[in-house]
Image (cartoon, rainbow, N blue to C red):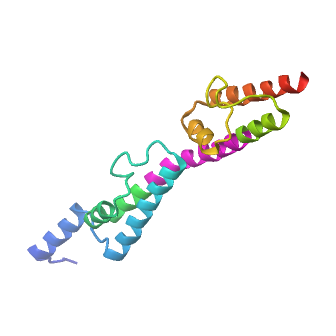
Amino acid sequence: MKINLSATTLLTICCMIAFPAYANNAATCEIYAKDAVGDNNLATRLGCGFANSNARWQSNYNNHYGWCLSTSSAALVSESAARDADMRPCQVKATQCETYAEQAVRQFNRNKQLGCGFSLATQPTGRWMDNHRGHYDWCMKAKPEWLTSEAKARTDGLTRCISQ
């Protein structure tokens, strides 16, 4: 069976194969842009180092929306997946840092309760304070071994205080 295709049909087929479909409509792009901005806002609240750092990580709704309208559906899916991949380790660290900050504040409060005398002025500065966000923000930037060292230093300080 012989198929006769006109030059226009052939050109249309070639263009469909050669160029990706830009089929993102306004409704799709509204959702995409809201999600992208929401992801960046969450990354900012969590203290993820990549928040507000590039085109992927920004809170400009119009930039995300405009990009969505001009790109392929495959690129849209890929970009969303890349943001998810960036967020996963940050969310894990944020959970760890929440626990770290809660423990640090509890240790500070125990210090006050026992009258140990540790305060914000105690060196190194920041080890003994009831500022949850301060401990959390420090943790988000700290190396894992620093977290262990600081928690141990506070525990050791409390142990010395109790044994006196």
Across and down, in percent, residue 40 comes to 44, 55
Name the residue nearer the viewer: 96 or 17: 96
Name the residue nearer the viewer: 133 or 109: 109
User: In the image, 65: left or right of 38?
Assistant: left
Instruction: State yes or no: residue 87 in magenta.
Output: yes
Name the residue nearer the viewer: 30 or 151: 151
Q: Quadrant of the N terminus?
A: bottom left
Instruction: State yes or no: residue 2 in magenta.
Output: no
Across and down, in percent, residue 22 comes to 27, 68
Is residue 136 placed above or below 77 in the rendered structure?
above
Across and down, in percent, residue 83 comes to 45, 53
Q: Which residues are magenta?
A: 81-103
Is residue 157 placed above or below 74 in the rendered structure?
above
- Identify the residue at the far right of this view: 163
Q: Quadrant of the C terminus?
A: top right
Across and down, in percent, residue 37 comes to 41, 60
User: In the image, 33: left or right of 136?
Assistant: left
Residue displayed at 34% across by 47% down: 54
Please identify the quarter of the rendering in which residue 78 is found. bottom left
Is residue 153 placed above or below 135 in the rendered structure?
above
